[in-house]
Image (spheres, rainbow, N blue to C red):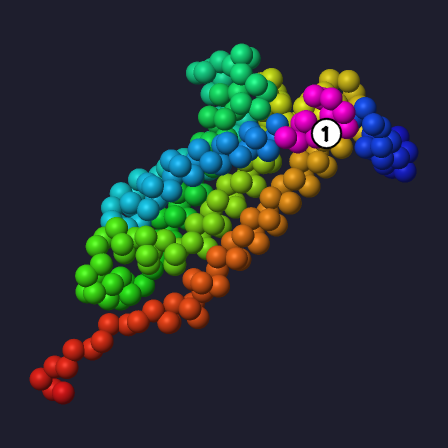
Amino acid sequence: MSEPGFFSEVVEWFADPLHWEGSFGVPSRLVEHLIMSGVSVLAASILALPVGMYIGHSRRLETLVVSVANLGRAIPSFGLIFLAVLVMGLGLDFPASLRPAALFALTLLAIPPILTNTYVGIQGVDPDTLEAARGMGLTEGQVLRGLELPLAAPLIMGGIRTAAVQVVATATLAAVIGGGGLGRFILDGFATGDDAQIFAGALLVALLAVLTEVSLGLLQRAVSPRTSPGRRREVPEPTPVAGPAA
């Protein structure tokens, strides 16, 4: 099949009103994909952020963080999803966007970047600034909430952005285990030999991943001015105590 003919078929696929209507249309599949991805990233954030904040603030269990992060990156996403299916089943009683096995696997995939960036961001806050805050009588909780979290916000947001893009791309595999989302177009295209539908589904997933990257990148930039190196210098430094030599 020549390229002009193939791309004309792709254009015809997108122009077909039937592909934009009903529960099997692009809008419905897009909503399923967003729900599946959003729930997974939210669950990963709820689990990883407190752990990362504790480890970064207390400087404990650093080896555990590195091990968990490396393990999470080493396990193939496809294998992780099928491992979840073996443990939890297909979960056909649940909506296509909320299949437990898919959500479990995607949540595990999203934890390492969020956990690592949170821990590294909080641990990287200037120790002199923290000592000055403690010297002013701030409690450990106030130091964490008032200094460490705001200063680490851009790096934490970067971890969430990385996790979200990975989850959006990997959620396509959920279609293999009966899940919903944009991956259904790719799977159904393989089943029927419809190359145009396969390409259309892959293009939709790629566009959604790019939009996720751009939107969360803008959000990361929005929190960066308050925590940029230039603003860090505005934090009052501890006043030197005059010694005998003075």
* Residue visible at 38% across and 39% down in the picture: 48
Q: Of residues 65 and 46, which is closer to you in this image?
A: 46
Q: Is residue 79 visible?
A: no
67 within the magenta span? no
28 within the magenta span? yes
Q: Quadrant of the N terminus?
A: top right
Q: Quadrant of the C terminus?
A: bottom left
Residue lying at the far left in this picture: please name it. 244
The x, y position of residue 157, in whole percent, is 47, 50
103 relative to 151, above or below: above
Q: Which segment is the magenta one?
A: 20-31
219 relative to 95, above or below: below
The x, y position of residue 116, in whole percent, is 40, 45
* Residue visible at 34% across and 69% down in the picture: 235
The amino acid at mark 1 is: Val
Dividing the picture into quadrants, the one containing residue 238 is bottom left
Q: How many marks?
A: 1
* Residue visible at 39% across and 48% down in the picture: 118
Residue lying at the far bottom in this picture: please name it. 246
The x, y position of residue 209, in whole percent, is 63, 41
192 left or right, relative to 38: right
Dividing the picture into quadrants, the one containing residue 194 is top right
The x, y position of residue 72, in whole percent, is 43, 35
SS of the residue under disc 1: helix
Q: Of residues 116 and 157, which is closer to you in this image?
A: 157
At label 1, counting other C-alpha atoms closer than 10 Å, the crowd grade (few under 14, some 14-19, many 20 or more) is many
Find disc 1 in the rendering and name its residue. 26
Q: Is residue 157 visible?
A: yes
* Residue visible at 62% across and 23% down in the picture: 180
221 relative to 75, above or below: below
